[in-house]
Image (tube, rainbow, N blue to C red):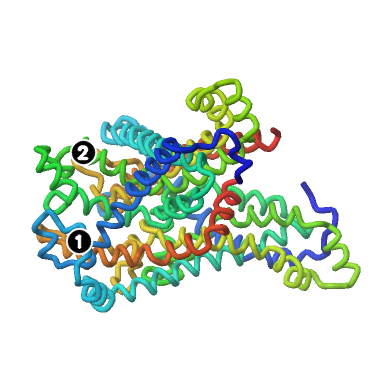
């Protein structure tokens, strides 16, 4: 590493200025999160009489306990479960159907292959926000409002993952498929025994990205979960604000905001290498 | 690009692509087709029948001052979000790149907001600037500045821009840092030997070599500002005051679900569809160029 920076490395005052600049940046990034954490550890009274304290209070367990067990409209524990099911459903569902179709498109010659490829490819272009009203009608006609399948299925109708797996399969040496064919292995045997283990890292990296994508969805759950028991945590926070002129119960709302961040933050920080790889790969 | 070695069979591959084709057909192509179809009609006041109006919805939209205003709002919003988040990210990435030790630690600390949903980021910033309890607005009040984003259009726009940009800094930082670290150090050292100072080196060497990353981020951030910031706007301002923060995606939602004006909402969807397509084509053109490069 020393050689990388070589002679333009910073010493003395320059180095300290660099650190200072970065620390200011980190402080700017963390200040909103820190305030939310403080608010989740104090009394409502501490907040409605500004300025609120800037150091944690002693109501942490009380606030989080109340949020998890009773919440405002629905227990936050229920919303966490809904978010988990949705995020896992989107990540696993999208990876599964994409692996299968990418395998078919790369390793077989069948009628309509090109058409399928382009049909799937077209979906790269259109986020769910753009076709929101008709998609809502489809879900309503299927009776899938307030259901996990309604939350998950429209969000896996996109081809980013198929495209990535196709690119990866193209780099797998032909000799492997050749050998499998000579040995008389069936295509699915080749898929499960060779291709899938080789794709492990790509699958994991994609999983991180898709989990966060699913967890952080807002507009779609807002539209199709009218029953508070089906709310996801990210959209449920906004529902906790009173509609009239009343004071919002900030300690509960902020405890919920912190709870909404914890799972994706753990995934991003814990799987940082895979996350960065997934990010760079999926944007290439 | 084609595989030389393939397996035999027609039914198996069809079966393999079936799940994706089914889901894509039902939840993508059908609704997208519906959006285009509905954009050519207006429903009667009771929602019982539809009346064919051809391009009437589009003509009406393009002459509607509110829709034009929303276009302008979206343009201002997207440009500000992109410039602020990319600017801060580039500044931090340049600093982190100067470090021999510790850049990894800063990276770990700076990627947090990526995990924070835009809607949650909205709630965090709303809390800080809340007109009654917000810490920042309270201290601004002490300094004699009366912050009120509920009434003041400029302050509302400023708040949604900062909240949206904040969540995007991590992403841009990661790409800028990767781009900076890919620049061969020998080039920079050669310039340093020739006596070029930091700012000169940055302007004449680093910035041009970083331009592919910058261009890529520019497109991706504009797409982000167009679509993924819905959560920020819905939680902080709900498009107000007086539609000052109603960006195009928010208008599709508020006209379609709150206002129940399906024809107009569908026409707006189609217009957005055209905009995303253009942005995507720009992006792919760029990727193609990079591949040939």
Residue at mark 1: A241
Question: Residue B36: percent from the left, percent from the top?
Answer: 46, 45
The image quarter in which residue A161 lies:
bottom right
Residue at mark 2: B155
Whether residue B10 is situated above or below residue A74 in the rendered picture = above
Q: Is residue B64 visible?
A: yes
Q: Residue at x 10, y 61 (%)?
A: A246
Q: Nearer the viewer, mark 1 or mark 2?
A: 2
Question: Residue B214: percent from the left, percent from the top?
Answer: 51, 34
Alpha-carbon neighbours of circle 2 within 10 Å: few (<14), some, or many (≥20)?
some
Alpha-carbon neighbours of circle 1 within 10 Å: few (<14), some, or many (≥20)?
some
Q: Residue at x 75, y 53 (%)?
A: A171
Residues B240 and A282: in front is: A282
Chain assignment, label 1: A
Whether residue B236 is situated above or below residue B82 in the rendered picture = below
Left of B84 or right of it: where is A181? right
Left of B159 or right of it: where is A105? right
Left of B230 or right of it: where is B32? right
Q: Secondary structure at mark 2?
A: helix
Residues A4 and B21: in front is: A4
Instruction: Classify the position of the C terminus of chain A by image quarter.
Output: top right
Q: Residue at x 21, y 51 (%)?
A: B128
Q: Spatial distance from mark 1 to mark 2, Cα to Cα?
A: 21 Å
Q: Secondary structure at mark 1?
A: loop
Whether residue B34 is situated above or below residue A88 in the rendered picture = above
Question: Residue B54: percent from the left, percent from the top?
Answer: 41, 38
Q: Is residue B267 visible?
A: no
The image quarter in which residue A94 lies:
bottom right
Left of A281 or right of it: where is B266? left
Q: Residue at x 77, y 59 (%)?
A: A107
Residues A8 and B234: in front is: A8
Disc assigned to residue B190: none
């Amino acid at each position: 590493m020393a050689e990388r920076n070589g002679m333009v490395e910073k010493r003395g005052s320059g180095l300290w200025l660099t650190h200072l600049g970065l620390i200011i940046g980190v402080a700017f990034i963390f200040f909103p999160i820190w305030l939310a954490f403080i608010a989740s550890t104090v009394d409502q009274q501490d907040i409605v009489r500004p300025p609120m304290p800037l150091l944690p209070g002693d109501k942490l367990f009380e606030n989080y306990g109340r949020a998890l067990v009773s919440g405002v409209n629905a227990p936050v524990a229920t919303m966490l479960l809904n978010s988990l099911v949705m995020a896992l459903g989107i990540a696993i569902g999208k990876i599964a159907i994409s692996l299968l179709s990418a395998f078919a498109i790369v390793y077989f010659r069948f009628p309509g292959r090109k058409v399928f490829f382009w049909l799937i490819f077209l979906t790269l272009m259109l986020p769910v926000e753009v076709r929101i009203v008709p998609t809502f009608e489809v879900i309503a006609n299927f009776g899938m409002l307030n259901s996990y399948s309604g939350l998950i299925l429209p969000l896996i109708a996109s081809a980013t993952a198929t495209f990535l797996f196709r690119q990866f399969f193209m780099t797998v040496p032909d000799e492997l498929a050749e050998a499998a064919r000579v040995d008389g292995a069936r295509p699915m045997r080749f898929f499960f025994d060779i291709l899938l283990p080789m794709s492990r890292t790509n699958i994991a990296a994609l999983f991180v990205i898709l989990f966060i994508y699913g967890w952080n969805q807002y507009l779609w759950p807002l539209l199709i979960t009218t029953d508070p028991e089906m709310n996801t945590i990210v959209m449920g926070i906004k529902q906790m604000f009173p509609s009239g002129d009343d004071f919002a119960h900030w300690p509960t709302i902020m405890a919920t905001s912190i709870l909404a961040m914890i799972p994706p933050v753990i995934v991003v920080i814990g799987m940082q290498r895979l996350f960065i790889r997934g990010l760079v790969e999926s944007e290439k | 690009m084609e595989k030389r070695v393939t397996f035999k069979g027609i039914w198996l591959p069809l079966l393999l692509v079936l799940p994706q084709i089914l889901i894509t057909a039902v939840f993508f192509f059908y609704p997208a087709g519906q959006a285009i179809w509905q954009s050519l009609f207006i429903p009667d006041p009771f929602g019982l029948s539809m009346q064919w109006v051809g391009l009437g919805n589009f003509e009406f939209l393009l002459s509607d001052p509110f829709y034009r205003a929303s276009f302008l709002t979206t343009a201002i919003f997207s440009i500000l979000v992109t410039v602020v988040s990319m600017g801060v990210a580039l500044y931090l990435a340049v600093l982190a790149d100067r470090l021999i030790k510790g850049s990894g630690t800063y990276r770990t600390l700076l990627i947090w907001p990526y995990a924070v949903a835009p809607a949650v980021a909205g709630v965090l910033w709303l809390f800080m600037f809340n007109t009654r309890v917000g810490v920042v607005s309270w201290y601004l009040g002490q300094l004699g500045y009366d912050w009120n984003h509920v009434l003041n259009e400029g302050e509302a726009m400023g708040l949604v821009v900062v909240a949206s940009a904040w969540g995007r800094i991590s992403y841009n930082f990661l790409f800028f840092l990767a781009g900076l670290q890919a620049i061969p150090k020998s080039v920079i050292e050669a310039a340093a030997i020739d006596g070029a100072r930091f700012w000169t080196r940055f302007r004449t060497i680093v910035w041009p070599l970083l331009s592919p990353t910058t261009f890529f981020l520019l497109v991706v951030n504009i797409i982000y500002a167009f679509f993924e910031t819905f959560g920020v706007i819905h939680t902080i301002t709900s498009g107000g005051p007086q539609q000052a923060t109603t960006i195009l995606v928010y208008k599709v939602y508020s006209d379609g679900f709150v206002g129940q004006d399906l024809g107009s909402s569908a026409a707006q969807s189609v217009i957005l569809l055209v905009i995303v397509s253009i942005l995507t084509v720009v992006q792919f053109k760029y990727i193609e160029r990079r591949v040939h490069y």
